[in-house]
Image (cartoon, rainbow, N blue to C red):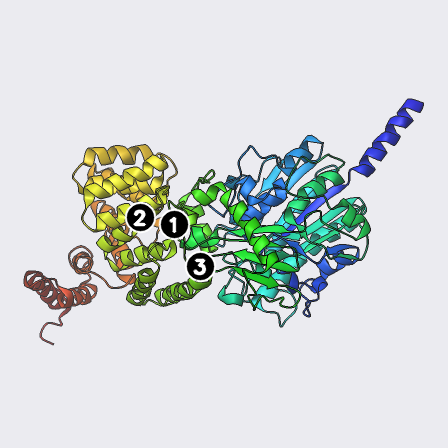
């Protein structure tokens, strides 16, 4: 009996020493836009309530203003130069780095992660150690609203026994902002997104209270980076290392945390790794972070080395500009860019007065320290860590969120050779944005001219090269488009399957079929089974008269649940050629389910219906082609002939032939259309009227 009581007492003591851990990361959240940090608008009442029952850090910093590398630093306690993840999309976290969830899971914690943005999908390597990694973001928006993420996390929390480690990531404040925002009226879209995120935080905190878990759960809420909101001419984040982008909120509450305290000394996201392990009673391995246990308990903090490293390779990866590096202690900041910077944050918190002076001992010492770190950075000389394997949809998703704008390519150009200062580059970025705006309004030629002007002054800008190549493809300038894409690949030789696919399409449009075939095959070398490249290869082989080879490509691919347009189209064409009408109809039906406006697919569906004697159906498919706008001569003639000869509807045939006469490509076709128009008018009795 005594031994059983001792076991129970020891178990109770162990449970008390092992609190539950709830880590909430707040994407794209400026500390100075939160109510507990003095913001005058009511954006974050739940975070304010958390701060009142816990400790708030006034000067907390991310080492990099980009989501994936910042979270990799949280989960490993390492600076980006050590964990190797330097940007969204290009990198995935290597397995050689122990992560927080693995340590906690090994210690008996139930582990669950619930992320809200495509930039943190499991393919980027942060899922290790989590028994549940929920990355079910919306396929259209590439994100998930805070309420849905919080709901998923709470549903999981209800099923697990303590102790648990839950990581909940909210993405709402990231661009694009919802026009309506959320929360009280009168907030900007960005602030409204913060309010919606804060409501998700409130759901988690309410569940802790209602479930009786508040007292034994350490809650840590931390931003991964901020948002520039147009300051220093940067619309979003990633280009610069100014306070609006790198100073983040950090709030903790729960067991061992002082109530109502504010800590002034600088903290870093790397500190969360040892802090959470220490809270779980574990000995943290060596890292670049420092445990905050004393700061949380006493509300006082003095960092052994107050100078926190900052970096961003975003300018380099996205635009081919020079990357930026810095050091800050929350009061001073030095930035290494082609034009050096130094700021006194106490007297100039918005960093409007660059006080860099090479004669200043402090500035010189800080820049010397930065230079030494940069020189030791393997990426600086061109090395690159493991590239994340991305699908076409994942590339498009990241591009929709503002990343991989030049394509999913890793630069050949060494960062040390990139010389354009981002402070000068943002002027070009405005011109690229103008090009994008006029492009979306339908002025494709105007967009092309603006991008070409950017490339005159910044010829190695992958963003501009990629956009110019795409626009030139839209305009039908396939040769020029191929030249731009080739240049991008020459600059960035770790090109992906997508880059070679676009090159293949451009070369094919330029009539260079053999070169296009090689580019499609290069795409398949990088990603065997990549359906768009298989479809493109089949398309090219058909056009080269190599039907048997094309049929093998198609036959091996359409057996799966493919959604590739080319594969489905050619599978249908092959079945139609064999007079297997049910199979042909099935393939074309799948094609139109993917792309309802596929003109060739609609034509072929009409052909299948006509072969089966279903002329009303055939006419309906051709009518859909005409409804797509700008009908072509052949479609008008086919539909008119159906109305006239098969459906005995000369009144419907007449306008088809009349329009065909007006756009006939030559005199012979005009005479043919005129003759059929006359026949239709004879049948309707309108001839001579």
Camera-side residue of 184 and 123: 123
- Mark nearest the camera among 3 and 2 is 3
Mark 3 lies on residue: 421
Q: Is mark 2 on a helix, strand or loop?
A: helix
Q: For the residues marked 3 and 2, what is the alpha-carbon distance in whole angstroms?
A: 30 Å
* Crowd band around label 1 with a 10 angstrom C-alpha radius: few (<14), some (14–19), many (20+): many
Residues tagged 3 and 2 counted as in contact (Cβ below 8 A) = no
Residue 407 disc label: 1
- Among all residues in the image, which is located at the extreme front? 359
Q: For the residues marked 1 and 3, what is the alpha-carbon distance in whole angstroms?
A: 21 Å
Going from N to C along the chain, the mark reached first, 1 or 3, is: 1
* Crowd band around label 3 with a 10 angstrom C-alpha radius: few (<14), some (14–19), many (20+): some
Camera-side residue of 603 and 70: 70
Dividing the picture into quadrants, the one containing residue 539 is top left
Residues tagged 2 and 1 counted as in contact (Cβ below 8 A) = yes
State whether residue 633 is above or below residue 570: below
| Residue 663 at x, y percent in the picture | 15, 65
Give left or right: position of 2 versus 373: right
* Crowd band around label 2 with a 10 angstrom C-alpha radius: few (<14), some (14–19), many (20+): many
Q: Is mark 3 on a helix, strand or loop?
A: loop
Q: For the residues marked 2 and 1, what is the alpha-carbon distance in whole angstroms?
A: 10 Å
State whether residue 32 is above or below residue 550: below
- Mark nearest the camera among 1 and 3 is 3
| Residue 94 at x, y percent in the picture | 53, 36
Going from N to C along the chain, the mark reached first, 3 or 2, is: 3
Residues tagged 1 and 3 counted as in contact (Cβ below 8 A) = no
Mark 2 lies on residue: 502
| Residue 227 at x, y percent in the picture | 56, 60
Which quarter of the image is occupied by the C terminus? bottom left
Residue located at (54% from left, 57% from top)? 335
């Amino acid at each position: 009996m005594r031994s059983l009581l001792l076991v129970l007492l020891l178990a109770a003591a162990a449970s008390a020493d092992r609190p539950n851990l709830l880590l909430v990361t707040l994407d794209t959240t400026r500390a100075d836009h939160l109510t507990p940090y003095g913001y005058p608008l009511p954006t974050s009442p739940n975070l304010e309530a958390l701060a009142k029952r816990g400790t708030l850090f006034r000067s907390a910093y991310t080492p990099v203003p980009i989501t994936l590398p910042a979270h990799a630093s949280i989960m490993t306690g390492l600076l980006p130069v050590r964990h190797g993840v330097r940007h969204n999309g290009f990198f995935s976290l290597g397995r050689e780095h122990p992560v927080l969830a693995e340590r906690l899971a090994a210690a008996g914690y139930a582990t669950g992660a619930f992320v809200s943005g495509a930039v943190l999908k499991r393919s980027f390597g942060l899922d290790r150690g989590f028994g549940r990694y929920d990355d079910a973001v919306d396929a259209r928006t590439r994100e998930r609203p805070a309420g849905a993420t919080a709901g998923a996390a709470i549903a999981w929390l209800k099923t697990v026994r303590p102790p648990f480690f839950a990581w909940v990531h909210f993405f709402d404040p990231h661009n694009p902002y919802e026009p309506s925002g959320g929360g009280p009226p009168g907030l900007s879209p960005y602030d409204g997104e913060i309010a919606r995120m804060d409501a998700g935080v409130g759901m988690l905190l309410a569940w802790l209270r209602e479930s009786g878990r508040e007292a034994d759960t350490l809650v840590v809420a931390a931003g991964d980076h901020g948002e520039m909101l147009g300051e220093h001419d940067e619309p979003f984040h990633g280009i610069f290392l100014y306070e609006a982008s790198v100073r983040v909120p950090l709030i903790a509450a729960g067991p061992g945390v002082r109530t109502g305290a504010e800590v002034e000394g600088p903290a870093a996201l790397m500190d969360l790794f040892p802090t959470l392990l220490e809270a779980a009673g574990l000995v943290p391995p060596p890292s670049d972070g420092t445990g905050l246990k004393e700061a949380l308990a006493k509300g006082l903090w003095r960092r052994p080395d107050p100078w926190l490293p900052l970096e961003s390779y975003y300018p380099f990866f996205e635009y081919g500009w020079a990357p930026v590096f810095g050091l800050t202690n929350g009061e001073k900041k030095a930035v290494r860019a082609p034009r050096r910077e130094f700021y006194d944050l106490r007297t100039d918190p918005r960093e409007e007065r660059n006080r860099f002076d090479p004669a200043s001992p402090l500035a010189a010492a800080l820049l010397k320290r930065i230079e030494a770190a940069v020189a030791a950075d393997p990426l600086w000389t061109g090395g690159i860590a493991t590239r994340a394997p991305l699908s076409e949809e994942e590339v498009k998703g990241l591009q929709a969120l503002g990343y991989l704008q030049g394509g999913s390519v890793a630069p050949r150009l060494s960062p040390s050779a990139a010389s354009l200062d981002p402070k000068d580059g943002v002027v070009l970025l405005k011109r690229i944005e103008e090009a994008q705006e006029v492009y979306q309004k339908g002025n494709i030629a105007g967009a092309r001219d603006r991008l070409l002007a950017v490339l005159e002054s910044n010829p190695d800008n992958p963003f501009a090269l990629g956009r110019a190549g795409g626009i030139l493809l839209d305009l039908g300038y396939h040769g020029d488009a191929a030249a731009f894409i080739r240049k991008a690949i020459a600059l960035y030789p770790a090109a992906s399957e997508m880059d070679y696919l676009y090159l293949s399409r451009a070369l094919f449009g330029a009539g260079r079929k053999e070169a296009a075939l090689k580019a499609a095959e290069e795409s398949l070398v990088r990603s065997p089974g990549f359906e768009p490249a298989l479809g493109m290869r089949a398309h090219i082989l058909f056009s080269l008269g190599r039907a048997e080879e094309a049929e093998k490509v198609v036959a091996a691919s359409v057996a799966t649940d493919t959604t590739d347009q080319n594969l489905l189209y050619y599978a249908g064409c092959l079945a139609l050629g064999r007079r297997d009408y049910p199979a042909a109809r099935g393939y074309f039906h799948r094609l139109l389910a993917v792309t309802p406006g596929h003109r060739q697919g609609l034509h072929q569906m009409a052909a299948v219906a006509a072969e089966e004697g279903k002329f009303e159906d055939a006419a309906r498919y051709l009518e859909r082609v005409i409804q797509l706008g700008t009908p072509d001569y052949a479609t008008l003639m086919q539909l008119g002939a159906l109305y006239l000869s098969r459906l005995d509807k000369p009144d419907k045939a007449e306008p088809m032939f009349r329009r065909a006469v007006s756009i006939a490509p030559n005199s012979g076709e005009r005479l043919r259309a005129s003759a059929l128009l006359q026949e239709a008018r004879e049948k309707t009795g309108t001839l001579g009227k």
